[in-house]
Image (cartoon, rainbow, N blue to C red):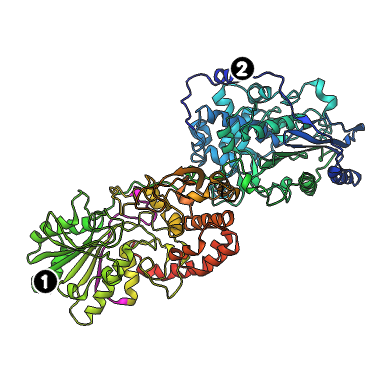
Amino acid sequence: MTVLPFRAPLALCLSLLFASVSAAQSKPSFADPSSPGFASIDRIVQDAVDHHELPGAVVLVGHDGKVVFRRAYGSRSLEPTHEVMTADTIFDMASLTKCLATAVAVMQLYQQGRIGLNDSVAKYLPEFAANGKGGITIRELLTHYSGLPPDLSLADPWEGKLEAYRRTFAIAPARAPGVQFVYSDLNFITLGALVEKLSGMPLDAYTQRFVFTPLGLAHTRFLPPLSWVPKIAPTQYDEHHVMLRGLVHDPTSRRMGGVAGHAGLFSTADDVSLYAQNLLDRLAGRPSHFPLSQLVLEKMVTPEQPATGTALRGFGWDIESPYSSNRGTIFPVGSFGHTGFTGTSLWMDPVSDTYVVILANAVHPNRPKSITALRSRVADAAALALHIHPDGGALAAKITGYNESLSGMRRWQARNGEVKTGIDVLEADHFRELAGLARQHGGTLRLGLLTNQTGVDAAGRRTIDVLAHDAAAAVPGLQLKMLFSPEHGIAGAFDKPGISDSTDAQTSLPIISLYGTTDAQRRPSLDTLRQLDAVVIDLQDAGVRFYTYETVVGYFLEAAALLNREKTGPRIIILDRPDPINGAFVQGPVSDAGIRSYTNYTQLPVRHGMTLGELARLFNEQLHAPLTVVAMQGWQRGDWFDSTSLAWVDPSPNLRDLEEATLYPALGLIETTNISVGRGTGTPFELFGAPWIKQANGADARALAAYLNHRFLPGVRFLPVAFTPQKPYPFAGEICHGVRVLVTHRNVLDAPELGIEIASALHKLYPERFDLARMNTLLVNRATLQAITRGDDPHKIADDWAPALEGFMKQRQAALLY
């Protein structure tokens, strides 16, 4: 979505937006509520009333655009007079204010381009920055990850909205933002202040005009008029022993005058039903008066909490947290809702097009009663009556589930570093390492160089030329004798085996290709290495176990170690370069022991978090070859390549940018199956698919994307796509149907686990077409392959990698340089 700059007063823009919406809205139609399937709801609620768990309630269930159940139970009031509950009773909605009113208003500001979700709150409310709150973002308020304490103190007798804002803005956070879910009224008190500041209107006036009126909610508002009082369910006695009826129950909101972002709204079951139906209609792309666009609403109701957080929260909505009892046990994770302290709740499931409204006065007359179990039982009863099954909704998911939240966290910020690679350090030191070697060899130094197009210095000069000319001039007796090229050739232009030897046009040096068709043709010959005193290696690695540059380094170390025992071997000198996908994350299954190949040199996890120089040191713990690593300067383990100030040079023909390198540990895992991973397109490793995905077993690309989105994987989202690879790649010239993978936050993405998720989805949806067995070529982990085959949950599969990863972390420690 393109968010246009805000160019007019907010009230005017929204007035125009909703001017054509009639106050009289089309309401959900009513079905027969006497269906036997709903009898269990009657029993559950009436039993609770009979056992004095609550005075009364109104329960309403909507499904497929119709109200299929609507009934009142028990008493509206017990004290000071008795009144029977009616279906049109008006309730104090308590914390449903947050989602029904305040969150929608905030998202309207976002939709109009007035705010960014990752903006600091203090950008708009400067006073809020006091006491270390300057970095708290709007996103963190909306998801309750701000670190603010739960509420304002009521120990002293303060009054007024402005005083509440002053106290909220002055309060110190209880914990760091973005770390822990703590439900806090202060979050939405602050958001209410934000709406008032940017709109220039009181919160109640704003929401009445731009939220409730467009929806046609006739009995929903803050500060209900006296004429409503006879139909309002009373709550509790206040501190003066006056029964609260038409005055908000929440004491903080009451001190603020009854209008606050966290509490104060009153409504009826019918109005909440109308709200829910319009919301579900907007999500589904049906005609709707809901005052947000479909895309913004989708964002609002999908997980947006920090991906490391265990409580799943949308913007104002609860998805899966300690507060989501009203989901029950049947509606799927991915449905959403909210509860209110007075006994109100709403839960919505876009997959089955269902909502459940429970409005109760559970706090009446004098103490709150827990109706947590009641909410869950009613939700399950409604789901069972409508034949909704716990596992029946994934393929029908209508909304995108993704998490981009950590882009709003101050803990994860790209560093603007200045990194010197090994070749730059070598030049800056006037080739001191090479001069020392030359002295050891009697004043001469015969060099070989393993490199390709990535071997360049900060000025863009080839390492070939730097060694052939500058080093030769600086170190008497130094001669660059020959070049070696890895897979893809000296210029990185080939994507096939069988590359022949050649000659470098600029230096006339021979180029020995190490990407032939046999194992021997991929290793340096011992006879060749006997002619050299040292081999310099300058290659940009990809940070992934099955990238073959790591193997060719291992082969040079093996040969050098063997020749060293003859006293004739060259020293291996690694000019180090960054791990482009950073060195902080170690992820994926460790390859099985005893299975070595060109794409699995030794036992490593898929994403090892090491530079090529560090890997060489790790390999050499067993090989004992003469090895020198010219370390980088200025590189930090958490640096992605775009934090280094270095120019990106494609390390191979199908890794053309950092986005593709980020996804390579995921999509690379399925590359050897009968799936295209985008080779031969403009975006290799950013998409995958096959001709047979279209309508295979009734699951097309849209169903595949929906299935993956419904997994709510941190840091990514998925879009259906069609693409046609070009020669010489798999399915060349054929239309492939599949999925584009969009990285929404790379710091929370576990790419190897994503690869397992994709393989599991393909195996589940296309068991007769997807050739899962071939995946082990690059996976090299039999237990993981067997778990996918069995249909184990990918989260559990990834959890099982932990012991081996912990072992590797200890093993690699001695080899680390940074």
Label 1: state its secondary structure.
helix
Find residue 208 and report its image quarter: top right
Give the percent coordinates (x, y) of residue 730. 40, 53
Residue 603 location (% of width, % of height):
42, 70
The mark found on residue 298 in the picture is none
* Image spot of residue 146 (x, y percent): 56, 43
Q: Label 2 is placed on what type of residue?
A: Ala
Dividing the image into 4 quarters, which one contains the C terminus?
A: bottom left
Camera-near label (1 vs 2) is 2
Q: Nearer the viewer, residue 414 or 679?
A: 679
Disc 1 marks which residue?
439
Residue at the extreme bottom: 566
Span highlighted in magenta in the image: 623-643
Task: Answer whether residue 633 is magenta in the image.
Answer: yes
- Compared with residue 243, is residue 12 higher up or lower down, i.e. above or below? above
Q: Is residue 75 left or right of residue 650?
A: right
Q: Is residue 435 left or right of residue 692?
A: left
The residue under label 2 is 19
Seen from the viewer's position, the closer of residues 565 and 76 is 565
